[in-house]
Amino acid sequence: MKRHLRLLIRYFAQYSMVRLAYKADFFIAFATSMTATILGFGFMLVLFTKIPSLQGWSFYEVMFLYGFSLIPLGFFNVLSWNLHDFSNLYIIQGRFDRVLLRPVHSLFQILFEKFRIESLQEVVTGTAVLWLCSGKLGLEWSLADMAWFLVMVPSAAVIYISVFLLLTTVSFWFEDRVGIVPPVFNMLTFGRYPLTIYNNFIQFMLSWIVPFAFASFYPTTRFLGRDEFAAHFRAVPLVAAFFLLLALMVWNRGVRNYSSTGS
């Protein structure tokens, strides 16, 4: 554990220096990321100028949900760069051979070779929005709430990583330059809104098939006083643990199935 933590720190420090060496490129990427975040909140503002509430959810409640979703999503985006392009970069181009030659677990290398540093702004922005909405909603954070928050954020990030890791492992059996990650990535937007606004099929999909609701909607329900979702709220860490173990099992099996391109 200590060795991997030390490696992670060195990976991040080294990549940060390389990334910041090209300052113009970094600030363009940061501006692009920030613009996408602002547009998301802009859409929310426009939406609520047309309607007073969204099926019983007030503006600040939806903003609270949106803000929370940005925090684990930001951590996920920092780490997800290689998962998004894994099939093309590592399988088709044969770079995975180099990964297997190193005395470090292959998944550790894939996740931590690159970082989308500009996505840390999502963590900062989401935290600021939560603070603002908490004040507007009159929410009082107890020590128990703070403890749950510190459990929910990493659990949600683990769910995002696990889902996309499962999708990435498909590349070990089916070589596809585009892969199935980008289409599912677009489904992340569904989790930024109250689950109750969707029909039963979508609610089931986002809860038990592609569990983005457990990474965004359900973790906020306790803080917003939505007691009808208490069981789902407490299940978030269990769902995260289940999908992480499943993803690791499938990844390890995929690595054993991998055959070199010979290039």
Image: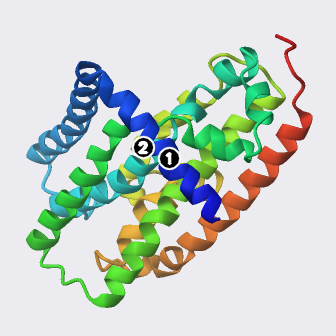
Q: Residue at x 77, y 20 (%)?
A: 175
Q: Which residue is mark 1?
A: 10
Asked whether the beta carbons under mark 1 and mark 2 sit within 8 Å of each other, the answer is yes
Which amino acid, mark 2?
A: Ala
Left or right of 44? Residue 21 is right
- Does dot 2 land on a helix, a strand or a loop? helix
Identify whether 76 is placed above or below 151.
Answer: above
Q: Residue at x 16, y 61 (%)?
A: 60
Question: Could one spot residue 206 in this view of the protein?
Answer: no
Give percent across and percent down for residue 210.
60, 49
Q: Residue at x 73, y 33 (%)?
A: 99
Give percent across and percent down for residue 138.
12, 78
Which of the 4 quarters of the picture holds residue 111? Answer: top right
Q: Quadrant of the N terminus?
A: bottom right
Which of the 4 quarters of the picture holds residue 49? Answer: top left
Q: Which residue is mark 2?
A: 13
Which one is in front, 47 or 259? 259
Identify whether 149 is placed above or below 120.
Answer: below
Task: Give the residue at the far bottom of this rendering.
Answer: 143
Which one is in front, 260 or 34? 260
Give percent across and percent down for residue 62.
25, 58
Graded by Cα atoms within 10 Å as few (under 14), some (14 to 19) or many (20 or more), the crowding at tag 1 reads few
Graded by Cα atoms within 10 Å as few (under 14), some (14 to 19) or many (20 or more), the crowding at tag 2 reads few
Question: Could one spot residue 117 in this view of the protein?
Answer: yes
Which of the 4 quarters of the picture holds residue 243? Answer: bottom right
Which amino acid, mark 1?
A: Arg
Left or right of 152? Residue 144 is left
- Does dot 1 land on a helix, a strand or a loop? helix
Q: Quadrant of the C terminus?
A: top right
